[in-house]
Amino acid sequence: MSRLAIEARGLSKAYRIGKTREVVLKGVDFDAYHGQVTMVMGPSGSGKSTLIAALSGLLRPDEGEVVALGENLWQRKAGAVDRFRLDHCGFIFQGFNLFPSLDATEQVEQVLKYCGVSRAESRMRARAALEEVGLGQRLHQKPSELSGGEKQRVAIARALAKAPSLIFADEPTSALDSTNGQVVIQLLHRAAVERGAAIVVVTHDPRLEAHADRVIHMEDGRILDDRMVNPPPAYEGAGRTGSCA
């Protein structure tokens, strides 16, 4: 039975560019469920990345509220928002965001150390996460020794190792070919089904639409279409489902 993971209402955000004020989110309402992949699609400049930043605690909206795992995120102090993000959110980005000097295992261990996980457990969980994404033979390779698809799988392992309730992926396949893109979205879908995480994927890649449980189309800062491909069986209310510790 699916539970509501995120509920946002009336999100608005504008940026000042010189003397011009550009509104990138215009009163957006949004929700996402545990155990589902919600795909937010739209052209560049439609507000997709700003939306995901507001939902995940990376960017404070000018107006509106975000209730994540039962807590009103933007009513908390900045330090508490940072801690919430560390404990309960996993992030996957277009550019991989890997440290050049660290091998695959160390990349994953790093985030667990920030969570306060012991060195021994960090190593064990990092290896398990890398094996889960098919990199059991690449544990000690550095980014320069990995392909683009392997780098993105390291990034996914880093996100999964915390056992997060919420995973946000911003254009996770745009730098990958079709085969590796399919691998990435399949791994994310498995995280939703097997771990019960709520996965929110921002993309303009139409190849991914077939793998979503729900598809939302944005344009010019607004949601134009919201289509549930695989509806949640029931609503049980919001609640925490995990932590990195």
Image (cartoon, helix red, strand yellow):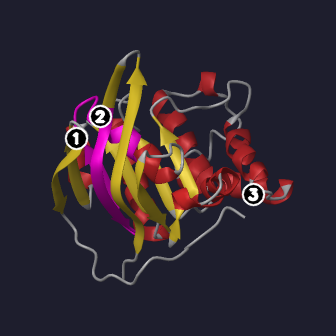
- Residue drawn where x is 44% and y is 46% of the image: 61
Kindly identify which residue carries mark 1. Answer: 207
Residue drawn at 28 percent across, 50 percent down: 27
Specify the segment rendered in magenta: 23-51
The residue that mark 3 highlights is: 124
Mark 2 and mark 1: Cα distance apart in space: 8 Å
Residue at image mark 2:
178
Instruction: Say how many tags the image has.
Output: 3
Say which quarter of the image contains residue 103.
Answer: top right
Q: Amino acid at mark 3?
A: Met
Report the front residue among 83 and 116: 83
From the viewer's perspective, tell me whether residue 25 is left or right of residue 229: right
In 3D space, how far apart are the residues under numbered discs 3 and 1 (Cα atoms)? 34 Å
Decide: is 150 above or below 183. above
- Name the side, left or right, on which 162 lies relative to 72: right
Estimate the x, y position of residue 66 in percent, counting from the top left.
44, 60
Q: Is residue 48 above or below residue 68?
A: above
Tell me which label, 2 or 1, sits earlier in the chain.
Answer: 2
Q: Which comes sooner in the sequence, label 3 or label 1? A: 3
Secondary structure of residue under mark 2 = helix
Residue 98: where, in percent of width, then height? 62, 31
The mark lying in front, picked from 2 and 1, is: 1
Where residue 202 appears, x then y in whole percent?
A: 34, 43
On whether residue 44 falls in the magenta region, the answer is yes
Q: Are marks 2 and 1 in contact (CB under 8 Å)?
A: yes
Disc 3, disc 2: CB below 8 Å? no
The residue at the point 54 percent across, 34 percent down is 151
- Specify which label sits upstream in the sequence, 3 or 2: 3
Going by the picture, which residue comes out furthest to the front? Answer: 19
Mark 2 is on which residue type? Answer: Ser
